[in-house]
Amino acid sequence: MAEIALKSLAHSYLDAPGSPQDYAIREMDHVWHQGGAYALLGPSGCGKSTLLNIISGLLEPTRGDVLFDGERVNALPPEARNIAQVFQFPVIYDTMTVYDNLAFPLRNVKTPAARVHERVMEVAEVLELTPQLKRKAKNLTADEKQKVSMGRGLVRDDVSAILFDEPLTVIDPQLKWKLRRKLKEIHQRFEITMVYVTHDQLEASTFADKIAVMYEGQVVQFGTPRELFETPNHTFVGYFIGSPGMNFLEITLRDDRVRVGDSALEVEEGMRRAIEAAPSANVKLGIRPEFIEVHEAPVAGGIEASVEHIQDLGTYAIVDLRLGDTSLKARVEEDQSPPTGRAYLRFPAARLGLYVDEYRVEIDHDESP
Amino acid sequence: MSLILENIDRLVGGETYINDVSLELQPGSFNALLGRTLSGKTSLMRLMAGLDAPTRGRVWMNGEDVTGRSVRKRNVSMVYQQFINYPNLSVYDNIASPLRLARVKRREIDRRVREIAEMLHIAPFLDRLPLELSGGQQQRTAMGRALVKDADIILFDEPLVNLDYKLREEFRDELRAVFAERNCIAVYATTEPAEALALGGNSAVLHEGRLVQYGRTEEVYHRPRTILSAEMFSEPPINIIDGCVSGTEVTFDSGWHFPLDDDLRALPAGEYRFGVRASHISLTPQAGDDIEMRMSVDLAEISGSETFLHVHNERVHLTVHLAGVHEFCVDAPVTLYVPTHKVYVFDREGAVVHIPSHLGGI
Amino acid sequence: MGESEMTDSTSNSPAADARRRRQARPVTRQWRKRALMATYIVFVLLPVYWLLNMSFQSNTEILGGLTLWPEDFTLEHYAKIFTDANWYMGYVNSITYVAMNMAISIVVALPAAYAFSRYQFIGDKHLFFWLLTNLMAPPAVFLLPYFQLYYTVGLFDTHVAVALAHCLFNIPLAVWILEGFMSGVPKEIDETAFIDGYSFPRFFVRIFVPMISSGIGVTLFFLFMFSWVELLLASTLTATNAQPIASVMTQTKGASGIDWGTLAAAGALTILPGIVVVYFVRNHIAKGFALGRT
Amino acid sequence: MTKVRNNHAWWLILPMLLLVAFSAIIPLMTVVNYSVQDVFDANTRFFTGTEWFREMLNDPALQAAVLRQFAFSLTVLAIEVPLGIGIALLMPKKGWQASAVLILVTMPLLIPWNVVGSIWQIFTRGDIGLMGWSLRELGYGYNITASPVDAWATIILMDVWHWTPLIALLCYSGLRSIPDAYYQAARIDRASQWSVFRYIQLPKLTNVLVIGVLLRFMHSFMIYAEPFVLTGGGPGSSTTFLSQSLTTMAIGQQDLGPSAAFSLIYFLIILLVSWVFYTAIMNMQKDKPDGGV
């Protein structure tokens, strides 16, 4: 059981890294608390696998410290860290039975046979592997194999954390949610710190209480699935989380009015002041497709847009809109008939985020615009 | 250019891959083939392409019988789910190869390759080898090769399966735009109903080698003819609850009664299967006639902007599709509301007997 | 910086000791591995070194007593080989029939391996098995019939005779290895090419063969190896015109006994082509020895 | 991969088939033909039926050669297989060392077989050979022309030198195909070196080892040139193996009938042993039905 802390950690695969681009992990601090269910989410090449390997001890970071319960473990090999890992493709010992596979990590440290039996039976019970215990691991299905490799981590009572590296890649789609549920159950029962690495928002949000979104070697946001959805901290999080992702409008301030292209946009006073105070010209407003109000007729405070396309997704529709040079997507529910030709949009103040140089800026909401 | 499949069967080593499929695809149409893995999508596409020959039945293209004609003599192209390119040719040569083989003039080849590359955003990589590109770019190259020749039929066999979800979203939007201006027949195999819906056009639902339903995509989605069609064409699958109608009441399993909605009063007494779409169930009552159900949470699957809630009580398992992010603990109690006016009803054999009135009824 | 503090804070705990031991172990293990490997390499090299050593000594030094390195360094044996047509033609002959065999084997094996890897056809399994049994045929069994056969068709003492005789085991070997490599190429590539309008021969030469070029390289390596090292058939089917170097070497027994120096020099020269060939395929050889099947 | 049914594939096979038929079937027919006849000259021959076969099977010299052959093949397999696995485990995986070691290890395989004999002849001679001389200096009366034990040991040592690389390279390629994740998982499970070998490496090697053992068995059973050059089959006939007996009989004595019968018996032994071995391994790998299913 452990808390895993990363202090001013940075890693480069080059011998003499210079510019920030040379780093697979740019300097970062991060703490995984004992017993948490975490996810590390990002597109391929964002550095999440590097970070995972640093935590498990397969890689030694170029700079900074990896601390387990405050103890520096940078140079310790994986076997000395008491970390278990579940890989993308099931790693099992083919020639052994399921029972022997589960017993293997315990036998390696000369655990008494009675204790081994007790632990194996307990873990097999939880993983619903009891009927398979006598079978050769080679003949299991992919999901059973993945459960076995998870089980090898769970039998050890000295394990401080379990790391998952895209563990459901090879699992049949119909079985995925069952395994996800199993994972959650296991987490609640064993209270082990778990870190789940994936590029899939569904996997991450389903499993984790808190998600670290990685982008270009840095964690750009660490928050609950709801926070990532409602208040993304960075434009990348807005784009990456949600299908479709967040809309971003490049805005300018002219004649004291906030404009998107040529159209003026009514915003809260607090927002206007924040835009005025922005230290950069890179200013964007972000709003999720789910929160845009789409009206067929002109409404007070509405901004006019043209309708480019309507995607009927059965119980809701995604409307592609054009506002000057900017494309937007809005979600319209089944009960509401989607507009044709022109639409009038309203952006609820509470749902509108301000992004300066790609990072979110908190604003004070006033009473009502 | 039209494609007609007439009572097609395909058997391989005693196993039936395709079972009596008849299908007529119109010129300029976009057609999704929807079905689970091994439902016969790939087999059907291979028959359309001419890579395999049917055991029985005929294939007609433009009124001509092409049943036994080899793939080389048909003007088709195909994109696979694996990223299939010629690894020893550059991206440019990959895209140009069908044109070169058709002896198109060199200048014309150059113009068309560059145009396609521009459209698919791979213009900067024309000199590279396919394996030096990312997965998405490799698949764009394969698509470029399929699109560059004016094929009569373009077949896509789950082309986006191996890409991650953000790329998939982008590809879908682009594909729709690409096909809007073409007059070929496009066939697109997928396991995901959402993909078929996003791409629009027509959909053919396949199950165990049989054609279950074919029609405009929204039509197939909203007005399934059978329970199988409804199950195949919804993600998460439509919730099915068995019940018995007697008089003005429906009884689910043992002693669980509800009064029938106005729409459903016309149903003769008997046993039925009731279908409720996952996205129609809500956490708050939407109308007076909603059925209230107390359930326990199995798992809340969250996909960034949506939540799929798996719940159960002692009688049924249900899946609920909620917009936005909702966090639930495993085994937490939850109250759900099922709108009776949005319920589909099927008979014991699976044929639809009632479609919600807001979708036009039966 | 943090290093020394860490050592202090953890040095007393037994767990830390155990951890350090774990870390230390791989280093000694590394050295033990290297020492063992070095021992084996010495075992491999020693006889070859001795051969080289001899080849640079004059015959008087060789017979005069054991010397660990050539004290009277001479190139006379090599000079003899390169000037005496009888000797150097041995190399030319060997290389000629080996090259011919490699060319014949690969050309007929490529389409055959493609057929086995892509199609089901009547008798495919039996045919493949029969091919493999030819790998097991002892050359000695075929000695006499070959001699008679080639004598009858007038091929005796030609390079073609040896090249064809070596086809007995080299073609099955080539088909076997190539089939493994070809099965690793997705058949969708073939289909895409046909959809694009490639004819089979054009697809095969332009697309398919370049795709398995490393497999072909490895196959050629094996073909070279087995044709180059074989002596029994090669020497039986030749007399003077196509005599391989290996059988020229058996004639070093002169009136004054064996000419050790020249024998050693000739032997040393037979090792060279092999080393050159391995050098070219060294990056594919690991995969090649699995015959494309792991 | 599912294969397409297509009998036109025969056209692709045909050139290969003709060539192999020319170099295998026609000669084999000749051998069969001889084996059932007594040939005096081109025009005079008698049909003998199975007489030659019976004679050969009862020939004590040949029986001894067969036994000797099996003893030799089994001995070299018993040494080369474990040694080859060991070397494969020791070989460096990357860098220039990997290439260098690879080339050096492969080298013995690319030396013509009679040259291998010559190399060892030079190396082991008591007067001019490093090994022979050293052993004598150390006080051991090493003499391969007089002592059958010395001759045997030397031939086995030579075969180990010559052929262990084949096993080593096969295993090396097998080892390279093991994904890193397996080693990482083993480290995380705190497996010992031995466990890693026993449960990860060895299982992955079974496939290549089957090929390796088969090839090694076949080749050792056909061995000819190396002992012929090194010992000439002696002292006595202590190192005369089957190929050499056959060659002497066929070429030296021109006993066409008996040697043809002998050839066929010889070939059949190899096929039979290979087949038995192969089937045994394949059955071993098949999963026994166990309780859990």
Image (cartoon, coloured by chain):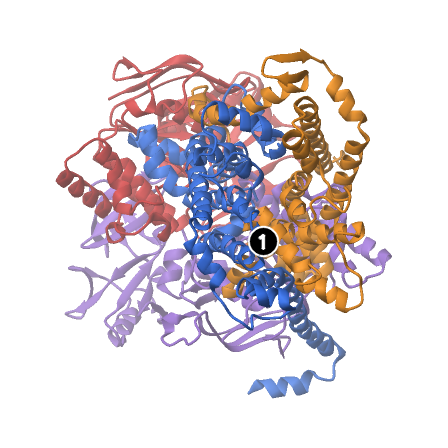
Q: Chain of mark 1?
A: D
Q: Look at 56% across and 61% down and name the residue there.
A: D101
Colour of chain D in the image: orange
The front one of A238 and B120 is B120
User: In front: B308, or C174?
Assistant: C174
Residue D219 quadrant = top right
Quarter of the figure with the C terminus of chain C: top right
Image quadrant in which you'd find residue A165 = bottom right
Quadrant the N terminus of chain C occupies: bottom right
- Give the image location of residue A54, x and y in percent: 55, 68
Chain the render paints purple: A
The 10 Å Cα crowd at callout 1, few under 14, some 14 to 19, many 20 or more, is many
For label 1, the residue is: D108
Q: Which chain is red?
A: B
Rendered residue at 34%/28% (across/down): C200
Per the rendering, the colour in which chain C appears is blue
Note whether residue D195 is visible: yes
Left or right side of D202 for B236: left
Q: Is residue A342 above or below residue C193?
A: below
In this view, the residue in front, C268 or D221, is: C268
Residue at the front extreme of this rendering? C255
Q: Position of residue D86 (x, y in %)?
A: 68, 57
Query: Picture coordinates of residue A33 (x, y %)?
Result: 60, 69
- The vertical placement of D256 against C63, above or below, is above
Residue A92: image location, x then y, percent: 66, 50
Q: Amino acid at mark 1?
A: Pro
